[in-house]
Image (cartoon, grey):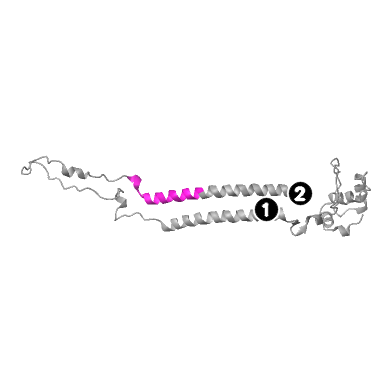
């Protein structure tokens, strides 16, 4: 039974380790995607507000509409239009209104990107150490598992069914309780190990606590 519990606990820890590994991969990918998305938004600035129309410089080489010496009447002089130069950003991205990167926000993003994998790795190592301790140690919380049982050599038949006992709290008559207990265990009164093992199931409260604090040396058949 003890081995089954250890196997079950070991399987649960292995399942947790696998889940943490997958979570680490998923969160690292999500962190990278979030970082790239925020950096792209910061660098793009106000791209979505529209661009300034550009004037094609090739128009400077077209033939004039009038001869050089001819001046048309009732025609306002058109101002010279020069081609715009720049990176194609809108008016909000020029020298008078530059895109300002939030350095504090970028630093916080970078800090989270660095710390998240470390936290997941620390948690993974902690679970891994716990699993290794269960696999290699013969002791449970510093106590030999065999010492936790009052009758470590007891072998129960698969057909044995635990009787239902009246619970003794320590306030009623102990002799009456023992008498009822023996009657419940009719057919096994000569099996001291079985009686010692199942007597604890007939106790409750402070009586159960006192009985479970006993060692094998203090219990006599």
Which quadrant would residue 55 be assigned to in this image?
top left
Q: Residue furthest front?
A: 136
Q: Position of residue 60 (x, y in %)?
A: 17, 44
The residue carrying pointer 2 sits among few (fewer than 14), some (14 to 19) or many (20 or more) residues within 10 Å by Cα, namely few
The residue carrying pointer 1 sits among few (fewer than 14), some (14 to 19) or many (20 or more) residues within 10 Å by Cα, namely some
Q: Position of residue 5 (x, y in %)?
A: 74, 48
**175 displayed left or right of 1:** right
Which quadrant would residue 156 be assigned to in this image?
top right
Kindly state the secondary structure of the residue where label 2 is placed.
helix
- Residue plotted at (57% across, 48% down): 23
Q: Position of residue 123 (x, y in %)?
A: 60, 54
The quadrant of the picture occupied by the C terminus is bottom right
Q: Quick check: is 76 in the magenta stretch? A: no
Q: Choose the circle earlier in sequence order: 1 or 2.
A: 2
Report the front residue among 170 and 40: 40
Q: Indicate which disc residue 131 carries.
A: 1
- Residue plotted at (83% across, 57% down): 210
- Residue plotted at (75% across, 60% down): 142
Q: Position of residue 175 (x, y in %)?
A: 93, 53
Report the front residue among 42 and 15: 15
- Residue plotted at (53% across, 49% down): 27
- Residues rendered magenta in the picture: 29-49
Q: Residue furthest left?
A: 69
**8 displayed left or right of 193:** left
**128 displayed left or right of 107:** right
Determine the main secondary structure of the stretch shown in magenta: helix
Kindly report the distance in space between the C-alpha atoms of the residues bearing marks 1 and 2: 14 Å
Q: Residue tagged by mark 2?
A: 3
């Amino acid at each position: 039974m003890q081995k089954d519990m250890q196997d079950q606990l070991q399987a649960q820890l292995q399942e947790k380790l696998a889940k943490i590994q997958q979570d680490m991969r998923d969160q690292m990918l999500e962190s990278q995607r979030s970082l790239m998305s925020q950096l792209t938004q910061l660098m793009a600035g106000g791209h979505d507000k529209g661009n300034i129309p550009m004037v094609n410089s090739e128009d400077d080489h077209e033939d004039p509409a009038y001869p050089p010496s001819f001046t048309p009447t009732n025609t306002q002089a058109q101002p010279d239009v020069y081609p715009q130069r720049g990176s194609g950003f809108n008016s909000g991205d020029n020298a008078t209104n530059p895109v300002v990167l939030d350095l504090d926000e970028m630093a916080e993003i970078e800090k989270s990107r660095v710390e998240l994998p470390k936290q997941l790795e620390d948690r993974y190592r902690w679970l891994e150490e716990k699993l290794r301790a269960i696999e290699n140690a013969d002791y449970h919380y510093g106590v030999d598992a065999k010492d936790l049982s009052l009758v470590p050599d007891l072998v129960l038949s698969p057909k044995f069914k635990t009787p239902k006992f009246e619970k003794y709290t320590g306030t009623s008559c102990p002799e009456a309780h023992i008498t009822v207990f023996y009657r419940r265990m009719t057919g096994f009164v000569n099996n001291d190990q079985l009686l010692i093992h199942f007597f604890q199931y007939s106790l409750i409260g402070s009586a159960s606590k006192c009985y479970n604090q006993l060692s094998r040396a203090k219990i006599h058949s």
